[in-house]
Amino acid sequence: MERATLRDIALVCLADALVGASFGAISISGGLPIWVPIALSVLVFAGGSQFAAVGVVLSGGGALAAVATGLVLNARMLPFGFAVGDVLRGPWWQRLLGAHLLTDETAAFALQQHEPRRRRAVYWICGVGLFVVWNLAVALGALAGGLIGDTDAVGLDAAFPAVLLALVLPSLTDRRTRTAALVGAVVAVGATPYLPAGLPVLLALVGLLFAGRPGAGDASSGAAGTTGTSAEGAGGAATADTATAADSATAAGGAVTAVGAAKGEVR
């Protein structure tokens, strides 16, 4: 395996460690018991969904709204799974473990490799590395969060909306996604004073009505150009819709959580 690939994986792990530590610290300082962020990280292992779900809970939403928000954000993993399905071979428990390690990063690194053996090696190295680093960082952040008294004094009250919006920003270069995210955020913020916490984020999916449909040829050719296979082209086409939905909900989550923080509702 190329040294450059290992270096890139290490850099991604370092970046995710910083985000994971923030997630653990903010969750605990917001009033959640220490086992919540740790259990979420082990069982869910999806940074964006974890931030969104905990943000809904800390702003007063129920568990059902938090789970629904997380599922919407993770919907893009279905087409990702089709695209890298050839990586997951062996007995059922090995395939299940491999599926649990599926993230944006592991899919991206795997799809850069054209040789099957290298693709599997990169997928597992990246997936296991991220899983270990993420969970250790979340645990350390949670321990540190218990030592922080006033989270507002160190700016952690703004971390949730900042992270959620940062997750969306790279996707806003696409006009469809930008339109869906903007409309979804406006709808969610406008509905916040009138609906129970958590529901405005789900209502933000109305933004998809204003995004239009992508050209099937564009989506599939873009993905096929990256991977060179028809299966991945189909995965890329399906990802276009689910990623736009996820970005709309994530942008709305960041906007709604920011409003809650400004009102002092996120503690």
Image (spheres, rainbow, N blue to C red):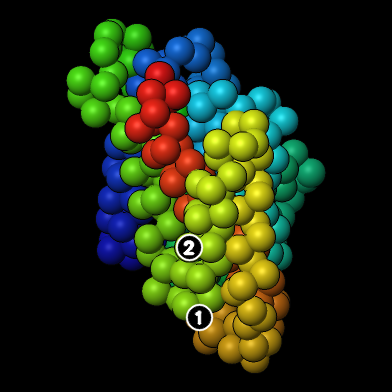
Residue at the image point whose x is 47% and y is 78% from the top: 175
Residue that carries the numbered disc 1 in the rendered image: 226
Q: Is residue 162 visible?
A: yes
Which image quadrant: the C terminus?
top left
**Pointer 2 with pointer 1, Cβ within 8 A:** no
The relative height of residue 225 versus residue 111 in the rendered view (above or below) is below
User: Counting other residues with Cα less than 10 Å from the Cα at mark 2, is it few (<14), some (14-19), or many (20 or more)?
Assistant: many
Which residue of the protein is positioned furthest toward the front in this rendering?
194
The relative height of residue 65 versus residue 177 in the rendered view (above or below) is above
Residue 158 position within the rendered picture, expressed as x and y whole percent measured from the top left:
31, 34
Residue 194 position within the rendered picture, expressed as x and y whole percent measured from the top left:
61, 37
Residue at the image point whose x is 57% and y is 80% from the top: 223
Which image quadrant: the N terminus?
bottom left
Q: Is residue 213 left or right of residue 35?
A: right
Residue placed most toward the observer, 12 or 259: 259
User: Counting other residues with Cα less than 10 Å from the Cα at mark 1, is it few (<14), some (14-19), or many (20 or more)?
Assistant: some
Which residue of the protein is positioned furthest toward the left in this rendering?
153
Residue type at mark 2 is Leu
For the residues labelled 2 and 1, the Cα–Cα distance comes to 28 Å
Residue at the image point whose x is 28% and y is 50% from the top: 11
Residue that carries the numbered disc 2 in the rendered image: 182
Helix, strand or loop at mark 1: helix
Residue type at mark 1 is Thr
The relative height of residue 250 versus residue 259 in the rendered view (above or below) is below
The relative height of residue 80 versus residue 126 in the rendered view (above or below) is below
Residue 235 position within the rendered picture, expressed as x and y whole percent measured from the top left:
67, 72
Task: Give the quarter of the image for residue 89.
Answer: bottom right
Q: Is residue 45 left or right of residue 242?
A: left
